[in-house]
């Protein structure tokens, strides 16, 4: 049993278990619950147990926390709000350790979130703690070996700067991050510089930061210059007008002429904002010549960015200067060869219109609009359509009708549906601009003509237009103009048009205000009534009063649920028990899977019926909670519904059945507590439990050969009084001629071998060094590289990098010679990171077996199997950090290599090696072992078992039939139905064994009436004593099944309507 200490540690144990789960969703939820766990533990235990767990032993050693960036991101976010949980600001520094590690990972979003959280924490810290803990962390990151930590450091300076003493501030200002060799670090200092400049104000910027700012503006890396260009307005607002005038205007002009198009593009986006900060005369004299050059830039991206922003200069320059200087540039851009440029000019004309009016541009606009409207790229046509209402408002109704009216209507006939859909919305917006009278005169007559077009797509578009414009006109226009046109289309020969008319009416009905009841009753309802009798099912569906809902009344809904449950039962019942058959699953690509495991079947089958889907989810949840009982869960739910139907069909209300089911469930759970058997969980008992579970999944011979491996695996990792972590049992698969050769390896099996032919293939009495150290060249950052002026420079860099790696190898070899001197011990290295060929050669010459790129999931298991401590550096190696195994050897199977680490002392992590001649056999064995492990684990933790082979169901049926006599009223019929449903398990077991079901059930009940607990002998069909034969079920499986099946079945029985969810055609208006 779990004592008080164990209960106190239980939240941490649960967290550990979930963080190691294979399902990323469970791991993510575990991280999200860190604050809840911390709240439950209290501040002191959070500081002494949870944070050290995150920081040191298991979690945030980046390599061992998780290989999913989503998990790391969630952890970084959670830690930012953890100050209150560790006891307030005086203990906030404890959170910096995990965040420092997260700030050094490869994924950018994780580092950014870690920086954000660290910045939140530093604000809460006392000043002495900032200088004692936070600043050293920033320094360590700044001097890190890898670019990730250095880039993270750039984001941490500004948060601490205003909180530090003057001495520390001076030290921070002297940090030379902006001169770092890697441009990835320098470009991130731009953001840091902006925040720091905002703190220092104008005088401080001029004294301390101006030189750095100028250096970044002329940096050799275009990426750094791009970052400056992208933040130019923000920088200018901070540094003040004097520095802008003296220093930044020449810099702005120089960057407008930059060699890189990306820099020019970024600066074009800053053009209006920067020009607003300087004198208009300076804009005309210094900036406008550069802008003129940009209109003919070779890069279309630069011209496109300029087209978006050039209109922003009009309010700055004023009307005369705009007409003289900007208008020619607008006209030039309107004739640009790239459609994106022309489109951008048109989309931003509102600013020009407010200054000079659009008349001066109208003659140039028209050709550009027409050309864009006929562009071969439909997305360009779509973009111009979206800008038409804005242009219409500026051009005026007369000009629009003359030049663009016909064009807007032509879009309704476009070959692309998205264009036709946008055109209908466009007409609605035009009506909002020009008014209802314009719609009556210009639009509705054209729509009337389209409704009679012989092309059905045009008639379909007409329905779309009617539905759209009805939202922009008055109820009178709807009743007088729109409804008559729709009525003509309601008798169209094309069903799609008819049901779209019904959908359009559902849009119009809420728009007809009070006083329009006559229109609704006289014009709309008769048409909907006629459509409700249409020969087409979809037309009838949408013509219903609420066309988005389907209703099946109580009897139909209940029968639907029962049929679905029985259909699923029929599929799965042949798989139950040792004599169950196997299903073949074939997916869409032709891949085949053979299985009799209920969970696998329910997860792989394509289930469309909602009732069957719910049952499948409940059954798979049973497996996830208890490890077994999936098939039994499906059978029992279906049988509960079937038995209930017997009484409901005779007029009994489902509510009475569910009341009886609730009474029966409580009685069954109470009886389960009396029926369970308390046993000492010795090895013999556990073997019986494992055999019982395994034989339901695989043949007897294979089950009997696997049971010892399953039991011994759980016993190896089990520590009395602690939860059993089955993640410490690695399951490795290997193609082999016999599936009965599967075995337990009391150690670790890895699916890769040594990468050097001269390394030893077999090492006895091996000392094992576990590393997470790169023993190869470090790769440069993505999109970065080194440029050399000569071959000699490159050779120097290669040589210096080689020396760095060689120094690490030398330390390892010296350490090996030290610990293996004269004792004939072998030496093995398992490294999570890479080892280059030259280093492998050195290790091989020194008799060292080295494996590189070991999988992360194996690293913690390895330490638990062989002992030792994983090292992140080779600087301080001592004999105490080594693990030990009696034998390490390599096994080659075809082109696959496996490395076995065996003969370990008291391993807390083991491997079950599954062998088989084909993938189907291996998959079935894997499913069986998974269930077997869970069965043994459950038995050890429960300390109780249940006699199997259907014995419990027979006994429970007899008990409930006696209990029924104590129940008053009609609810006893529900108890009887519940009791009869319990017999489905022994019935199916007998049926799958090929025996007469009624004979078996009668003999079982007679034997039980004589005082014997008996089950079905699946070899003879006779009765047997499960306890004598060693057939034991899990207690928790039966308990969970009784609970969940009763609830699910009762819920289905109370369903009186099945509705396909949809939005009502009537507005609720907040009323019930």
Image: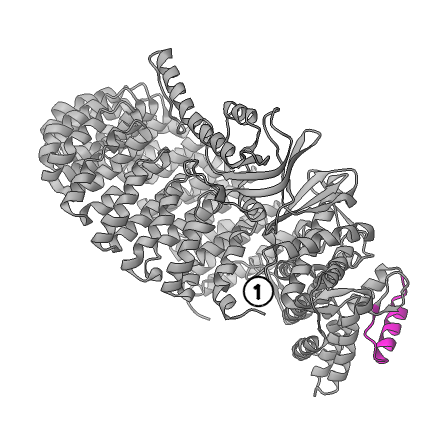
Disc 1 is placed on an element classified as loop
113 lies left or right of 29 = left
Residue 901 picture location, percent across and down: 63, 41
Screen quadrant of the N terminus: bottom right
Q: Residue at x 36, y 49 (%)?
A: 97
What is the span of residues highlighted in magenta in the rendered image? 995-1015
Report whether residue 192 is seen: yes
Say if the magenta span includes residue 1005: yes
191 lies left or right of 983 = left
Specify the quadrant of the image occupied by residue 793.
top left
769 lies left or right of 901 = left
158 lies left or right of 679 = left
Residue 2 picture location, percent across and down: 56, 69
Q: Main secondary structure of the magenta part?
A: helix
Residue 215 picture location, percent across and down: 20, 27
Specify the quadrant of the image occupied by residue 240.
top left
Q: Which residue is mark 1?
A: 721
Is residue 207 placed above or below 842 in the rendered structure? below
Is residue 510 placed above or below 667 in the rendered structure? above
Q: Residues within 10 Å of mark 1 (few under 14, many from 20)?
A: few
Q: Residue at x 18, y 33 (%)?
A: 274
């Amino acid at each position: 049993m779990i004592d008080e200490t164990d209960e106190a540690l239980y939240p941490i144990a649960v967290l550990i278990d979930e963080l190691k789960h294979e399902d990323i969703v469970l791991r993510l939820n575990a991280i999200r619950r860190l604050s809840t766990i911390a709240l439950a533990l209290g501040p002191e235990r959070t500081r002494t147990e949870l944070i050290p767990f995150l920081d040191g032993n298991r979690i945030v050693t980046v390599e061992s926390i998780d290989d999913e960036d989503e998990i790391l991101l969630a952890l970084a976010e959670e830690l930012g709000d953890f100050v209150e949980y560790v006891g307030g600001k005086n203990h906030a520094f404890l959170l910096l350790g995990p965040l420092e590690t997260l700030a050094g990972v490869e994924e950018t979003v994780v580092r950014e979130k870690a920086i954000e959280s660290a910045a939140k924490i530093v604000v809460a810290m006392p000043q002495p703690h900032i200088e004692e803990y936070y600043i050293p962390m920033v320094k360590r990151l700044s001097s890190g070996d890898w670019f990730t930590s250095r880039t993270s450091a750039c984001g941490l300076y500004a948060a601490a700067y205003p909180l530090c003493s003057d001495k520390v501030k001076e030290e921070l200002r002297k940090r030379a991050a902006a001169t770092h060799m890697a441009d990835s670090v320098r470009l991130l200092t731009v953001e840091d510089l902006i925040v720091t400049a905002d703190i220092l104000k104008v005088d401080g910027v001029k004294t301390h930061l101006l030189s750095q700012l100028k250096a970044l503006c002329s940096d050799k890396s275009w990426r750094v210059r791009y970052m400056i260009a992208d933040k130019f307005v923000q920088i200018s607002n901070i540094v003040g007008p004097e520095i802008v005038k003296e220093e930044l205007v020449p810099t702005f002009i120089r960057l407008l002429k930059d060699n890189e198009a990306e820099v020019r593009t970024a600066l074009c986006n800053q053009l209006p904002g920067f020009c607003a900060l300087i004198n208009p005369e300076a804009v005309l004299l210094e900036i406008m010549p550069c802008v003129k050059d940009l209109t003919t830039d070779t890069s279309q991206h630069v011209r496109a960015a300029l087209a978006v922003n050039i209109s922003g200069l009009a309010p700055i320059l004023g009307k005369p200067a705009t007409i003289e200087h900007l208008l020619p540039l607008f006209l030039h851009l309107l004739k640009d060869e790239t459609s994106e440029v022309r489109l951008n000019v048109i989309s931003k004309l509102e600013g020009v219109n407010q200054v000079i009016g659009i008349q001066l541009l109208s003659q140039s606009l028209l050709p550009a609009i027409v050309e864009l409207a006929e562009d071969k790229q439909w997305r360009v046509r779509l973009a111009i359509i979206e800008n038409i209402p804005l242009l219409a408002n500026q051009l005026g109704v007369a000009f629009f009708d003359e030049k663009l009216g016909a064009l807007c209507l032509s879009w309704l006939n476009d070959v692309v549906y998205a264009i036709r859909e946008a055109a209908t919305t466009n007409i609605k917006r035009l009506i909002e601009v020009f008014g209802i009278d314009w719609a009556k005169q210009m639009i509705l007559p054209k729509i009337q003509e389209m409704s009679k077009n012989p092309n059905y797509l045009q008639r379909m578009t007409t329905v779309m237009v009617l539905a759209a414009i009805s939202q922009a006109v008055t109820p009178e226009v709807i009743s007088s103009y729109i409804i008559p046109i729709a009525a003509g289309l309601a008798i169209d020969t094309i069903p799609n048009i008819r049901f779209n008319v019904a959908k359009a009416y559902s849009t119009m009905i809420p728009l007809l205000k009070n006083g329009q009841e006559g229109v609704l009753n006289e014009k709309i309802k008769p048409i909907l009534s006629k459509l409700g009798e249409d020969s087409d099912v979809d037309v009838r569906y949408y013509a219903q009063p609420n066309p988005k809902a389907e209703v099946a009344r109580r009897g139909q809904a209940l029968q639907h649920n029962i049929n679905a449950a029985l259909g699923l039962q029929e599929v799965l019942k042949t798989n139950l028990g040792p004599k169950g058959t196997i299903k073949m699953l074939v997916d869409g690509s032709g891949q085949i899977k053979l299985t009799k495991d209920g969970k696998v079947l329910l997860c792989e089958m394509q289930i469309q019926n909602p009732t069957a889907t719910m049952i499948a989810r409940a059954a798979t949840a049973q497996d996830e909670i208890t490890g077994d009982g999936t098939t039994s869960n499906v059978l029992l739910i279906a049988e509960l519904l079937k038995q209930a139907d017997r009484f409901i069909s005779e007029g009994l209300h489902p509510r009475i059945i569910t009341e009886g089911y609730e009474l029966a469930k409580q009685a069954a759970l109470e009886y389960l507590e009396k029926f369970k058997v308390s046993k000492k969980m010795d090895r013999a008992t556990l073997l019986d439990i494992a055999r019982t579970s395994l034989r339901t999944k695989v043949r007897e011979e294979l089950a009997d050969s696997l049971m010892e491996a399953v039991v011994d695996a759980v016993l190896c990792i089990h520590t009395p009084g602690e939860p059993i972590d089955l993640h410490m049992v690695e399951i490795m698969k290997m193609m082999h001629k016999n599936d009965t050769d599967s075995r337990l390896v009391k150690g670790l099996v890895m699916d890769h071998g040594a990468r050097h032919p001269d390394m030893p293939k077999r090492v006895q009495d091996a000392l094992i060094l576990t590393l997470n150290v790169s023993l190869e060249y470090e790769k440069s950052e993505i999109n970065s590289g080194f440029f050399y002026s000569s071959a000699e420079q490159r050779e120097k860099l290669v040589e210096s990098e080689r020396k760095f790696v060689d120094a690490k190898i030398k330390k390892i070899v010296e350490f090996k010679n030290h610990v293996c001197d004269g004792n004939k011990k072998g030496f093995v290295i398992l490294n999570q990171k890479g080892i280059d060929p030259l280093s492998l050669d050195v290790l091989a010459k020194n008799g060292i077996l080295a494996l590189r790129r070991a999988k992360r999931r194996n690293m913690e298991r390895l330490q638990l199997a062989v002992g030792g401590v994983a090292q992140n550096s080779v600087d301080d190696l001592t004999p105490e950090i080594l693990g030990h195994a009696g034998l390490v050897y390599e096994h080659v199977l075809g082109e696959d290599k496996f490395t076995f680490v065996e003969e370990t002392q008291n391993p807390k992590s083991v491997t079950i090696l599954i062998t088989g001649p084909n993938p189907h056999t291996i998959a079935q064995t894997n499913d069986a072992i998974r269930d077997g492990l869970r069965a043994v684990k459950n038995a050890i933790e429960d300390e109780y078992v249940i006699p199997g082979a259907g014995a419990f169901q027979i006994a429970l049926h007899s008990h409930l039939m006696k209990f029924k006599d104590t129940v008053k009223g009609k609810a006893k019929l529900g108890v009887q139905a519940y009791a009869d449903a319990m017999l489905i398990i022994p019935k199916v077991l007998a049926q799958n064994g090929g025996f007469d079901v009624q004979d078996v059930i009668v003999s079982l009940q007679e034997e039980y009436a004589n005082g014997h607990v008996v089950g079905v002998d699946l070899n003879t069909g006779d009765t047997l004593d499960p306890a004598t034969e060693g057939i034991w079920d899990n207690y928790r499986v039966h308990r969970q099944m009784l609970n969940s099946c009763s609830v699910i079945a009762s819920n289905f029985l109370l369903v009186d309507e099945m509705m396909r969810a949809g939005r009502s055609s009537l507005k609720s208006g907040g009323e019930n």
